[in-house]
Amino acid sequence: MNSAKSEKVDAKKERLSAKEKVILLLCGTLIGIVNGFFGGGGGMICVPLLEKVLHLDNKYSHATAIVVILPISFVSAIIYLLSGNLESVPFLTVGSGVVLGGIVGSFALKFLPAKVIRGIFVFVMLAGGIRLLF
């Protein structure tokens, strides 16, 4: 009986109002534009949006952002490739490291506390922003 009650609560949480769907569609559009424009980086706004709009837990926000960004990055990569803006050697070498890092990071996400994940995210965002200034 307890699991039936839990399933009803979970099903209710997954239903979104029309307003929430429109907000999420607009957020998704913004994420896609940022990712397409910069060739990545949609996750930097996806994670906070998922936390604020859907009230997702930090770990779920990061995991969802990764899954959302994957197809966007794939489409952007194809467009860059077809337009001649992609070098094969850096793509293959850096891409291999990204795949390995993604595997390690996804396993680490499972074990790290939410505060540590948030701290790493903040550090990376600040370091990236400071680097762009200089």
Image: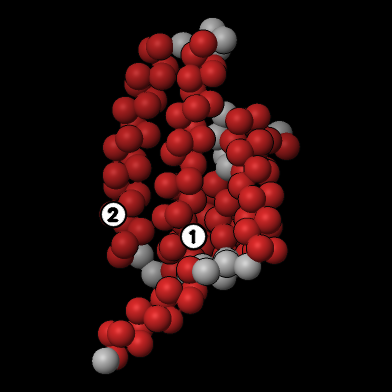
Q: Quadrant of residue 40?
A: top right
Q: Residue at x 67, y 44 (%)?
A: 30
Q: Which residue is mark 1?
A: 61
Q: Position of residue 105 (x, y in %)?
A: 35, 49
Check the image and report above or below for 58 versus 95: below
Q: Quadrant of residue 1?
A: bottom left
In space, the residues marked 1 and 2 are separated at their CA atoms by: 15 Å
Q: Which residue is mark 2?
A: 107
Q: Residue at x 34, y 40 (%)?
A: 101
Check the image and report above or below for 84 versus 42: above
Q: Nearer the viewer, residue 91 or 54?
A: 54
Which amino acid type is shown beneath numbered disc 2?
Phe
Q: Is residue 106 left or right of residue 34?
A: left
- Tag in front: 1 or 2: 1
Which amino acid type is shown beneath numbered disc 1?
Ser
> Residue placed farthest to the right in the image?
133
Q: Position of residue 25 (x, y in %)?
A: 64, 50
Residue at disc 1, secondary structure: helix
Q: Position of residue 10 (x, y in %)?
A: 41, 76
Residue at disc 2, secondary structure: helix
Q: Is residue 22 left or right of residue 101?
A: right
> Residue placed farthest to the top in the image?
84
Q: Nearer the viewer, residue 67 or 127?
A: 67
User: In terms of sequence position, does the residue under pointer 1 or pointer 2 come before the other?
Assistant: 1
Check the image and report above or below for 41 versus 90: below
